[in-house]
Amino acid sequence: GDVIVFHAPPAANCPEGTGCDFIKRVIAVPGDTVQVKESALYVNQQRLDESEYLESAVITNEGSFTAGGRTSTMGPNEYFAVGDNRAHSSDSRAWGPVTNDEIVGRAFFRYWPAKDIGVLPKISY
């Protein structure tokens, strides 16, 4: 549930020389299995309860990495990170796991949108 900042993988196609970093939510850690089915994320075959940070109407679509209901197991030092703005997020659903060496840090404070300013709540699954 932590929100992390990491260097975008090459598959994200960031413009060269931009120092492109992403901010996404970790939903699976080393050893976990991940699958997108029934418009939701499943971790270790359990539907992920994301009600603390997503509205109930949000649909989680597959990406090229999770296409066809593919189940993926995170390897050592791999994390599955997805954006909370699912419809417009380039994330692990499209290009796969983030590795430990790509992670820059953890986000702990939100300043935008202004109505949601404050410390990010700790999410536990």
Image: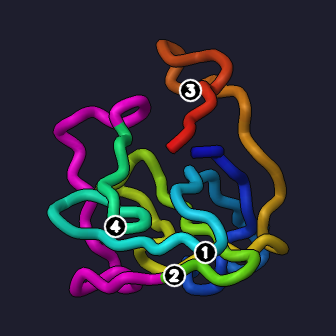
Q: Disc 2 designates what residue?
A: 73
- The numbered disc on residue 31 is 1
Few, some or many residues within 10 Å of mark 3 (<14, 14–19, 20+): few
- Tag 1 near tag 2, CB within 8 Å: yes
Quick check: 88 above or below 108?
below
Q: Disc 3 designates what residue?
A: 112
Image: magenta residue range:
51-72
Report the mark closest to the observer, 3 or 4: 4
Quick check: 51 above or below 44?
above
* Residue 98 drawn at (x, y percent): 65, 73
Q: Disc 4 designates what residue?
A: 45
Disc 1 residue type (three-letter): Gly
Few, some or many residues within 10 Å of mark 1 (<14, 14–19, 20+): some
At a point 25% along the width and 65% down the height, the residue shown is 61
| Alpha carbons under labels 4 and 1: distance apart | 13 Å
Mark closer to the chain start, 4 or 2: 4
